[in-house]
Amino acid sequence: MLLAGVDLAQVRATLKQLGLDGWLLFDFHGVNPILPRLLGPIGFATRRLYLLLPTEGEPVALVHKIEGTPFSGGQFPGRVISYARWEELHAGLAEMVRGRKLAMEISAEDAVPYLDRVPYGVVELVRKLGGTVASSAGLITRFAATWSAAELDDHMYAAAALAEIANEALRWAVTQGGTGLTESQLQRRVIDAIHARGLEFDHPPIVGFGPNAANPHYEPVEGKDLALGRDQVVLLDLWAGRRLGTVFADQTWMGFSGTRIPAKVDEVWRTVRDARDAAIAVVRRKAGKEPLRGFEGDQAARGVIERAGYGQYFVHRTGHSIDRDLHGSGPHLDDYETHDDREILPGTGFSIEPGIYLPGEFGVRSEVNMVWAPEGPRVTPATPQVDLVTP
């Protein structure tokens, strides 16, 4: 049944609180991940699709005639309007939007790109046909970015497994300095360990040695990657879940292939670790007691790094939303790339991953995840990294 996972009564209540007449969702070739998350799987889809969840009345779907099968036979709990010609599309859409103030996946001036999913031309058309458009930010957090109990269980399993995999791989790797171990070889070892635990991923883990660890999105390429030297930083960034489409865990762990950690490496590591813990602390302090907004976590972590004199080397947000997409659509811990003032709500999760990247030298990142579980905010893995892994 389409919309099976949506509590329509709660959607309607939230729409009323926000002063809206409905939530109008649009998708075309997967441009908007929010619609399929709410609607459920509809299979092969290549035409424009509109879904209206109104404050009053039944849901309405505007569907192309050649793609109506998933909506037939009582599979959709509402009314279906079919179209083929563009004139029919416009007529059906006008019926859905005229005189209504509707939430859509937009962000004024593209302030938060993870909200800005609807093409400008679609917004123009809705307005031309008599609708008023507002942002669906608050709806997305409540109904598209929250985790189910099963997804929380999937995440907890993956988080514990990845922590074990990362620590085993780093304990072994840091003893291999000067032996010819390459980034790709360590990456392959980690991939095999992930699969051995029954986990899946959609992109391979990141392994960076020495100066390559200073590139936040470095990807090793076999034959062009580095071999691990003695006394080098090792960065391992890995993510996985029980299956594609569930909530993943996403972690970064750090090692050093020498027994005597240089003062600068130690200072950078401690600064990043303390920044991570400062963000964790502000979430724990505010959650459930006062409004907690995404930018506040970033400010807490970034303040630690800036006070230590490394602010110019922290070049990305502190954390990203995690839902069924690893970089999800809920609030991010960000007051750097964007000013994300969306409120973090119970049931949502996100990464905390401050980093310092010194070009040509080394980089350090420490990444954990947090979820606002039924009992309160939880950090995963349960025991974050305290010290660099060394031989």
Image (cartoon, rainbow, N blue to C red):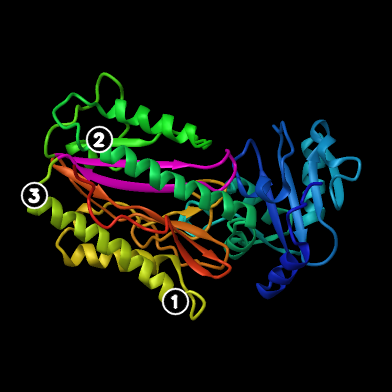
Query: In the figure, is residue 132 to the left or right of 68?
Result: left
- Residue 173: mark: 2
Give the distance between the C-alpha atoms of the residues marked 1 and 3, in whole angstroms.
37 Å
Tell which tag, 1 or 2, sits nearer the viewer: 2
| SS at circle 2 | helix
The crowding category of the residue bearing disc 1, from other C-alpha atoms within 10 Å (few below 14, some 14 to 19, many at least 20), is few
Q: Determine contact: label 1, label 3, CB under 8 Å.
A: no
Which residue is at 10% across, 53% downward? Answer: 264
Instruction: State the residue lying farthest toward the top.
Output: 223
Q: Quadrant for the C terminus, please.
A: top left
* Mark positioned earlier in the residue sequence (1 or 3): 3
Q: Is residue 220 visible?
A: no
**In this picture, which residue range is highlighted in magenta?**
232-257
Is 339 in front, or is 120? 339
Q: Is residue 56 visible?
A: yes
Give the distance between the C-alpha atoms of the residues marked 3 and 2, in whole angstroms.
19 Å
Residue 237 is a magenta residue: yes
Query: In the figure, is residue 151 to the left or right of 261?
Result: right
Where is residue 38 drawn, in percent x and y? 69, 51
Where is residue 5 drawn, in percent x and y? 73, 54
Which residue is at 65% across, 60% downward? Answer: 143
- Residue 286: mark: 1
> Could you tell me the amino acid type at mark 1?
Lys
> Could you tell me the amino acid type at mark 2?
Ala
- Residue under numbered circle 3: 262
Query: In the figure, is residue 262 to the left or right of 306?
Result: left
As drawn, 182 above or below 283: above
The crowding category of the residue bearing disc 3, from other C-alpha atoms within 10 Å (few below 14, some 14 to 19, many at least 20), is few
